[in-house]
Image: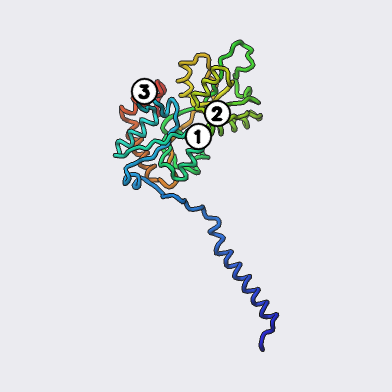
Amino acid sequence: MIPDKKHIQRGLYAGIALLAIALFIFLAPRKNRAPQPTFPLYDYDDIAAKGVLRAALEYNSISMFVNGDTLAGFDYELIQAFARDHGLRVDIMPEMSFYKRLRDLSEGAFDVIANEIPAVSPFKDTLLLTIPIVLKKEVLVQRKATSPDDSLFIKSHLALAKRTLHVVKGSPAILRIRNLGDEIADTIYINEVEKYGPEQLIAMVAHGDIDYAVCEEGIARAAADSMPQIDISTDISFTQFYSWAVGKHSPILLDSLNTWFERFKQSETYQEIYQRYYGNRSPL
């Protein structure tokens, strides 16, 4: 019997439906796959072949700064020592924003963030962190009390409620301040400053332009030597481990850095570098 027009149409619709289901099943797994990077995936072998290590550093009085007619700094000296021991040249890429450093690393703009990153879980999901390099903490920078009842002077974390803390845009301290707000069950306002570094924020506190800033203790201590009117006695974070970071696509570079750090931290050269920037604080 010759099928009528209705049977032909039903068969056609059924075939289209089955094809659509098959395409959905075939394509669905691809939809959930992570997008493939659009840049060359560099690891240590590629870096060694080119002879160039691209490193992002923050410009501040501990990590990297201008000293006369040359560059200096704790992280600057370490990355130069690593490169020297591995026959590499370092291309330094200054970048103040913490989150821009994270993004640019993930996009392959450089190979390593040679600045200390808190070794906490949110960052472990997107980065490969080296072994801990230093112990650090964030502190509140404020002016010293002018009287026993100075209402501006912060003596405890509870007094941070409804205050505005100024930080460098993208600072890792932001996460800690938000958590601190949860701990005191009140709002702590955060002003992210894009055009200034931590030293400039500390100077603004000292001169009365702003009341509070948050920055790393080592930078605050260095500034306090020339600005006796500031107080840095209130901790914002606990002392915690800080590491360098490479992208998820660079496990061999991570292993090379870790192996080198394990050895180099036992040397007199490392002790001299550490004492130069961290003074009498005990290294790891």
Instruction: Tell which circle, 3 or 1, labels the residue nearer the N-terminal end.
Output: 3
Secondary element at tag 2: strand
Q: Residue 97 carries which label?
A: 1
Q: Residue 231 at what x, y percent from top left?
A: 53, 17
Q: Which residue lies furthest to the bottom in this view?
A: 1
Quadrant showing the N terminus: bottom right
Give the mark, 1 or 2, whose residue is nearer the N terminus: 1
Q: Which residue is the site of mark 3?
A: 68
**Distance between the alpha carbons at the discs numbered 1 and 2:** 11 Å
Q: Is residue 251 left or right of residue 25?
A: left
Name the residue at 52% across, 32% down: 171
Residue type, label 3: Gly
Q: Between 204 and 42, which is closer to the camera in this rendering?
A: 204
Quarter of the figure that contains the C terminus = top left
Q: Residue 167 carries which label?
A: 2
Percent coordinates x, y for residue 108 in the rendering = 44, 45
Task: Judge the density around disc 1: few (<14), some (14-19), many (≥20) Cα neighbours within 10 Å.
Answer: some
Label number found at residue 54: none
Whole-angstrom CA distance, mark 3 to mark 2, is: 28 Å
Identify whether 254 is placed above or below 36: above
SS at mark 3 in the image: loop
The residue lying at 68 percent from left, 80 percent from top is 7
Give the residue drawn at x 41%, y 39%: 112
Residue 19 vertical position relative to residue 63 in the rendered view, above or below:
below
- What crowding class fits label 3: few (fewer than 14 Cα within 10 Å), some (14-19), or many (20 or more)? few
Mark 3 in CB contact with mark 1 (< 8 angstroms): no
Q: Quadrant of residue 158?
A: top right
Q: Earlier in the sequence, mark 3 or mark 2?
A: 3
